């Protein structure tokens, strides 16, 4: 039986007559005799009268914490990837920090990529059961506990001595894929040994000398990598002006400037000088300068025929990274790619390049129209879990982070990478709950609107 409470009708409630309001309000004298109080003056309740506080009242409020200066405490205080970036900048010499943080020419592409994630509006649904949030997804035929993986980054041990080992082990612990770069500073075999239960992918630059490429492909297969990611947006190297201004070399040279810089970051230099020399671990058999190695890696003659050769050679999953138009997305899928990465190389190649996040809806729609099962992945500009959720809602199957994880690495090694993934996971879970969705599959374009469109 339902019991209904009818609200009172203010029109039937008689308003007090002005003559019913006393001109004075009674107070209480010392003998309990009522004392008139002037109209408009409120009596102060005893509980609100000022008094000298007792120590017993103050003691519970005086909770002084001891200062904590450990790496764990420092990382725990960081609530965003941006805060980890601040820590990284304080602890890393300028040249390696700028190599990570910078982009090509005027860095317009990088700035626009980050702004793209800010220029959106989420459309939340209410009154949904979001008591349990599931962030797991499938990518390229296998499960991932989170919808984000670690992108390939070169020279990683230059940023912090744990380098690729920290990244691969953090990814293994988080249950997500890790991608080793051809220009990495840990070998394919060593990364596989460091994270034997992780899902390891290998990123390849197709060389003019196909025998060298074939050797790396075979090593990746033997080491258990199930996915090969070929990068195609590097016909030549981009103009990374921060590196030019810093006189960046691999390894960093001990010039007067770097020695002065080292005086402010002694921990970085101690780690750098007391670990094995920095080399291209996947290419250690070859000799030559860094410029010569890069020129041999970046093949300006690369065509779709080379992609056909690669598809015939590699038996695992094949992903093409560096897609920046709808037409090219369709073409690489037609040539056998199992997945694409919408990427402008983190803004490090062509400045004013297309922004992957803006390109995403159109590419996703086009591939679905072709009845393609190719995975659509995205990188560049991701700095929060909300960025990842926005990308997934607009059609991405998966995302990759590069700079974001390197900021954590520079801030605290393996523990710093763990902290980045913790921050992103918490961000994603909170964003999904506030959107009213409990699983990745529930996200749709209706949850996001790009402002100005």
Image (cartoon, rainbow, N blue to C red):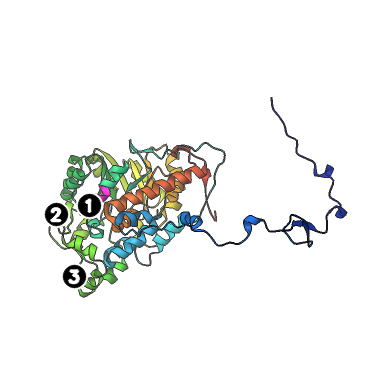
| Residue shown at the point (27%, 50%) measured from the top left | 167
Check contact, mark 2 vs mark 1: CB within 8 A. Answer: no
Residue with the mark numbered 1: 182
Q: Is residue 128 above or below residue 426?
A: above
Please state the extent of the stretch shown in magenta in the rendering: 161-168
Task: Label 1, secondary structure: give it.
Answer: loop
Spatial CA distance of label 2 from label 3 is 23 Å
Task: Label 3, secondary structure: give it.
Answer: loop
Magenta stretch encompasses residue 162: yes
Q: Earlier in the sequence, mark 2 or mark 3?
A: 3
Q: Earlier in the sequence, mark 2 or mark 1?
A: 1
Q: Which mark is residue 284?
A: 2
| Residue shown at the point (21%, 47%) measured from the top left | 191
| Residue shown at the point (17%, 53%) measured from the top left | 281
Furthest residue in direction front, as rendered: 31
In the displayed structure image, the side of residue 41 where residue 49 appears, left or right: left
- The answer to whether residue 93 of the structure is visible from this angle is yes
């Amino acid at each position: 039986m339902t019991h209904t409470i009818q609200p009172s009708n203010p029109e039937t409630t008689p308003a007090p007559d002005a003559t019913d309001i006393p001109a004075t309000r009674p107070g209480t004298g010392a003998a309990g005799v009522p004392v008139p109080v002037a109209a408009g003056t409120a009596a102060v309740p005893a509980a609100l009268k000022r008094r000298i506080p007792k120590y017993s009242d103050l003691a519970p409020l005086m909770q002084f914490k001891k200062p904590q200066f450990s790496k764990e405490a420092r990382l725990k205080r960081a609530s965003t990837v941006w805060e980890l970036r601040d820590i990284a900048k304080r602890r890393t010499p300028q040249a390696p920090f700028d190599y990570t943080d910078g982009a090509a020419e005027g860095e317009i592409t990088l700035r626009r990529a980050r702004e793209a994630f800010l220029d959106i509006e989420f459309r939340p649904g209410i009154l949904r059961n979001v008591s349990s949030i599931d962030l797991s997804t499938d990518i390229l035929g296998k499960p991932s506990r989170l919808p984000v993986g670690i992108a390939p980054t070169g020279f990683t041990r230059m940023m912090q001595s744990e380098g690729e080992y920290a990244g691969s082990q953090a990814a293994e612990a988080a249950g997500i894929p890790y991608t080793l770069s051809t220009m990495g500073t840990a070998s394919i075999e060593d990364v596989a040994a460091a994270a034997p239960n992780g899902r390891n992918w290998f990123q390849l630059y197709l060389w003019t000398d196909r025998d060298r490429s074939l050797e790396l492909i075979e090593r990746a297969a033997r080491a258990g990598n199930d996915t090969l990611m070929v990068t195609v947006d590097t016909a030549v190297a981009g103009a990374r002006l921060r590196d030019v201004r810093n006189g960046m070399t691999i390894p960093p040279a001990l010039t007067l400037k770097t020695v002065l810089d080292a005086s402010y970051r002694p921990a970085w230099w101690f780690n750098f000088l007391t670990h094995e020399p920095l080399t291209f671990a996947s290419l250690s058999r070859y000799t030559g300068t860094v410029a010569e190695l890069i020129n041999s890696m970046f093949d300006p003659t690369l065509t779709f025929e080379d992609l056909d050769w690669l598809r015939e050679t590699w038996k695992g999953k094949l992903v093409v990274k560096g897609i920046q138009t709808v037409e090219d997305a369709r073409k690489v899928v037609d040539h056998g790619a199992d997945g694409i990465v919408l990427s402008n190389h983190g803004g490090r190649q062509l400045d004013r390049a297309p922004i992957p996040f803006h390109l995403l809806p159109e590419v996703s729609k086009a591939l679905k129209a072709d009845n393609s099962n190719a995975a659509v992945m995205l990188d560049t500009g991701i700095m929060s879990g909300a960025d990842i959720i926005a990308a997934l809602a607009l059609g991405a199957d998966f995302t990759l982070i590069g700079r974001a994880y390197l900021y954590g690495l520079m801030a605290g090694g393996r523990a710093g990478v763990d902290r980045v993934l913790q921050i992103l996971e918490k961000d994603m879970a909170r964003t999904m709950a506030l959107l009213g969705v409990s699983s990745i599959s529930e996200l749709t374009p209706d949850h996001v609107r790009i402002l100005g469109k």
